[in-house]
Image (cartoon, helix red, strand yellow):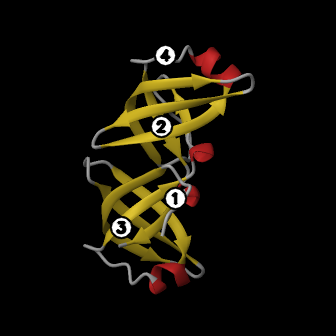
Amino acid sequence: MSLSIRNQLPGTVTAVTPGEAMATVAVRLSGGQDLTAAITREAAEDLALTPGTAVRALVKSTEVALATGRVDGLSIRNRLPGTVTALTTGAAMATVAVAVEGAELTAAVTRQAADDLGLSVGTPVVALVKSTEVSLATA
């Protein structure tokens, strides 16, 4: 199966916490970072997710926010430090490639946001992703 989702991060499930309707799934990415996905309990069961299961964490580029400094006071659990490796700007939007340990992420942000943050190749950033925006796929 081919997907249009650019951000496909390989990892391994480290924990599954089922709830009434949703489950949180802790994933250790191949670069060593921890990521949390909040998916339906049914999906976690259908995928037979248990610690040790190999997965790909899928995140649309429009669901990746960027920060250029320390981030406190947010409910967003997934915070991946990295460095801008490429920046493509258009009239309204910008595509930002970010190297994180062991992977590369793409973020789609407004051009104004990219300008306001002073993004350029080499800028250190933190990629932010809500756990509800992380989908999981098994091999």
From this view, report whether residue 39 is shown above or below residue 128. below
Say which amino acid is labelled 2.
Ala
Comparing 53 with 6, the one in front is: 6
Alpha carbon distance from label 2 to label 3: 20 Å
- Name the residue at 39% across, 18% down: 122
User: Is disc 4 surrounded by few (<14), some (14 to 19) or many (20+) residues within 10 Å?
Assistant: some
Q: How far apart are marks 4 and 1 (CA)?
A: 26 Å
Please say if the residues under marks 1 and 3 sit with CB atoms less than 8 Å apart. no
Q: What's under tag 1, amino acid-wise?
A: Val
Query: Mark 2 or mark 4, which has the lower sequence index?
Result: 4
Measured Cα–Cα span from mark 2 to mark 4: 15 Å
Q: In which quarter of the image is residue 92?
A: top right
Query: Which residue type does callout 3 highlight?
Result: Val
Q: Residues within 10 Å of mark 3 (few under 14, many from 20)?
A: many
N-term-proximal mark, 4 vs 3: 3
Disc number for residue 107: none
Q: Which amino acid does label 4 sit on?
A: Ser
Q: Position of residue 127 (x, y in %)?
A: 48, 37
Q: Mark 1 points at which residue?
A: 134
Q: Earlier in the sequence, mark 1 or mark 3?
A: 3
Q: Name the residue under label 2.
A: 127
What residue is pinned by disc 4?
120
First in sequence: mark 2 vs mark 3: 3
Name which quarter of the figure residue 99 lies in. top left
User: Residue tagged by mark 3?
Assistant: 55
Relative image position of residue 16 (x, y in whole percent)? 39, 73
Q: Identify the residue at image location x=54%, y=54%.
A: 5
Q: Crowding at label 1, few (<14), some or many (≥20) Cα neighbours within 10 Å?
A: many
**Residue 102, percent from left and from top:** 27, 43
The secondary structure type at the circle numbered 2 is strand
Q: Under tag 1, what secondary structure?
A: loop
User: Which numbered disc, 4 or 1, marks the residue that appears first in the sequence?
Assistant: 4
